[in-house]
Image: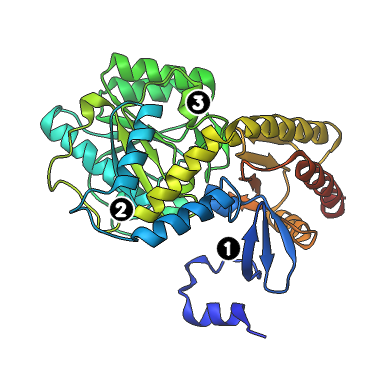
Amino acid sequence: MTNWAELDARYMMPTYSHLKLPIAIERGEGNYLYDTAGKRYLDLFGGLAVNVLGHSHPRLIEALNEQGKRFLHISNVYLNPPAITLAKRLSDLTLKGKVFFTNSGAETTEAAIKWLHKYQTKVAPDREGIVVLKGGFHGRTLGALKLTRQPSVYQDFPLPTFEVIEVEPENLTELEAALAKKPLAILFEPVLGSGGVIPLSEAYLQRIGELTQTNDVRLLIDEIQTGMGRTGTLFAYQQTSLQPDLILFAKGVGGGLPLGGMIAKPEWSDLFGPGDHGTTFAPSPLSASLGNAVLDCLFDEGVLEGARASIDYLWKKLFELAEHSPFIKEIRGKGMMIGIVTGGEPDQIKALRQKMQEAGILIDITQRTIIRLLPPLTLTQDEIDIFVQLLNNKLNEVFS
């Protein structure tokens, strides 16, 4: 039998060695993953918010086969119908502006930094600085890394020289002082994902909107993890009064294939001119075809509507569990993006994850002690019942 863990250690650079679980995945089907030994797992990690439709969704496989028979890659020298179609749909559903496609979330952040530079040079040469939130995460490439505000991620890599202004989430005094300086922009996640699954309050978001308009500061929203229906709407900002200038997206948009991008408001859609930015692969015709299939499923086939019912049911069951479980201190997040705080030590949380894994359920840990759930939008009420019951049992085993 192939020892995949040994081969991984021998041939893969160990950047994920502290995170990898000893499970070699053979296939995925629906909301489940199957390892090479045939064991089935309910996947509540969802490929880090990528698998919004679960695994091997029939509509995605259909799109994969159809586009695969046509062409896989053509470069940006030619017109790309799947990508143009996806760009129009995303624009119509959001800001009515233009789209720039990338291959990933970090690439999207890098593109946004260059976009802001163009805004500075063309429109606001007297402004500088990007406001970000402490605990925010926007990627690991060098430009994105400077905007990511988690010390464990900084390390000692060289960083670009543009100014970054860090403020504490929900601290209105710091927010008002930062935006009163009239920086170029503010960039934030509506729900801090890697930072601990922390949703920003409605009052805080409203104040961001007011201050950015008053001070003519560009409003950039990182919807890389919150997008594609994860919070109950296509993008989380659509549940607020915010009017972003730029939306960053990735993860779930490609249906499991690499794809990201940003959507600009019409008045800022032409800041990028010919040759200002580019990429060999994005937008991949294959990824764009799957992106169109994702939107078909969300809006035409009722997945997003069904997900709202599952979201309500999942939160209801978790709150019921928290009411009688002494081991749950807080449940937070939004939609299918949930953080469960137990107050346990990192070793206890790892033990809990291990017990859930042995019972056939995959969960994630962020910030060492926060249980993070990023389930597919196709999660059923029966699966929710199974998960909540097992979570209760395993909490009792680990913490009693």
Say which residue label 1 marks: 19
Give residue 185's quadrant in the image: top left
- Identify the amino acid type marked 2: Ala
176 lies above or below 50? above
Position of the N terminus by quadrant = bottom right
User: Is residue 120 among what the camera can see?
Assistant: yes
**Residue under the image location 41 percent in, 28 percent down:** 93
Tag in front: 1 or 2: 2
Say which residue label 3 marks: 170
Q: Residues within 10 Å of mark 2 (few under 14, many from 20)?
A: many
Give residue 128's quadrant in the image: top left
Q: Nearer the viewer, residue 127 or 94?
A: 94
221 lies above or below 380? above
User: Would you say 99 lies left or right of 351 here?
Assistant: left
Q: Residues within 10 Å of mark 3 (few under 14, many from 20)?
A: some
Q: Position of residue 321 (x, y in %)?
A: 82, 36
**Residue under the image location 79 percent in, 42 percent down:** 382
Q: Position of residue 205 (x, y in %)?
A: 46, 22
Q: CA distance from mark 1 to mark 2?
A: 28 Å
